[in-house]
Amino acid sequence: MTELESYEPVKPGFVHLKFFPLNKRAAQILVHIAAWGCFLMLPLIFYSRPADSSFIPEQAVTPFFFISNFFYIGFYYFNTHMLFPRLLERNKIISYYLIIIVIMIFFGTMRRIYEFFFGHFQRFSTSLPLHPLRGDFHPPILSPGSIAIFLLVFLFSTGVKVMQKWMNSERRNKQIENEKLHAELSFLKSQINPHFLFNTLNNIYSLAENKSDLTPIAVMKLSNIMRYVLTEARQDSVPLEKEMQFINDYIELQKIRNTDKTSVGFTVVGDIAGKKISPLILLPFTENAFKYGVSTRELSPINILIESNKNNIHFRIKNNKHNNGKNSLVNTGIGINNTRRRLDLLYPGKYELNIEDEPLTYTINLNIQS
């Protein structure tokens, strides 16, 4: 077997070492253990040593050393997993730094606290092996050394979280750009595709032949849709008014293609001025209603509601089910999975999507925090 034939691809999520694979979680744990091991070894490295190689620095073996470092390590994870995400990331800056100052005072007085509960420190000479100096050593009220170590751990833990947040933000921005491009391409291929344009232009041609007064209106609606897709939809967010106008133009064009059996109610409640939304995020649901909720023989009501308040945008669309009772976004241009994915990227933790798939009706409720 050649070297190329014996090659095995590395599974995603694993760090491949020569002798054994490690998943990401195990690798992170090993890195943390190694980092804290180096941290605990610092006193042994920088402590002043006499010529006697058998000398063990006093600081490395006292209970206070292990107790204090236990608190330093605990503070690191408390800061990265509790204080930083719950306070600093939520712009509670004053509360965050007040807590940090209180904790710093605690670490600064930790030597005195230890002395109060466990007795006096005994200072040892750095030139004679375990040789105590005269008199008991009383640490200062605020220990500069303890504060310095605390600040080191604080800056390192905060720096790590800031770096992770920045990297995640960059990764998310890149994903959003890729997803946005994919959504735009999918929209151009499925929604404003040649088949849609062909049917719309045929309808406009029929209106023109009959000298209908609706001809210029239909041309204007189609022009507005194409302009919106090619210009506004390239932005990260657009005014809610423009998105509503786009949806309205799409509905008006669909009305031209459908019979009198189809009735559409489009209601906007609340003040939408100043609100912004990701472009084309509501179109898959609207398309779904027209694709599966319209019949030439049965009444086909479609009700669309946009409700805007101070902190929320609520979108609701309800339609009857035809086509043997099937109603699904899976087969539409963008699809439910891609739509959810876009919502996850654009509004992480800030949206709620509920789909009520009943025997005769299909209802979508989407809430987006604005």
Image (cartoon, rainbow, N blue to C red):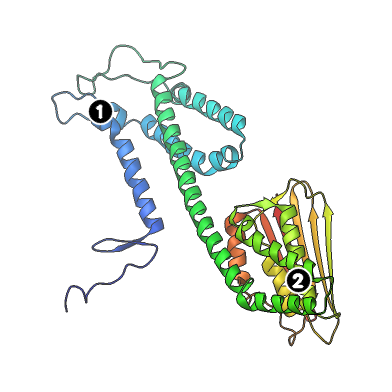
Q: Which residue is mark 2?
A: 253
The answer, for residue 160, to whether it is visible in the render is: yes
Quarter of the image where the N terminus is located:
bottom left
Question: Relative to residue 260, is residue 160 drawn left or right?
Answer: left
Question: Relative to residue 159, is residue 273 drawn left or right?
Answer: right
Relative to the observer, which residue lies in front, 366 or 26?
A: 366
* Kind of residue at badge 1: Phe
Q: Please provide percent x and percent y for residue 284.
A: 67, 69
Q: Quadrant of residue 214?
A: bottom right
Q: Please provide percent x and percent y for residue 73.
A: 42, 38
Q: Quadrant of residue 298?
A: bottom right
* Kind of residue at badge 2: Leu
Q: Is residue 222 above or below residue 107?
A: below
Q: Secondary structure at mark 1?
A: helix
Distance from Cα at disc 2 to Cα at disc 1: 78 Å
Question: Relative to residue 105, is residue 258 drawn left or right?
Answer: right
Q: Which residue is mark 1?
A: 46
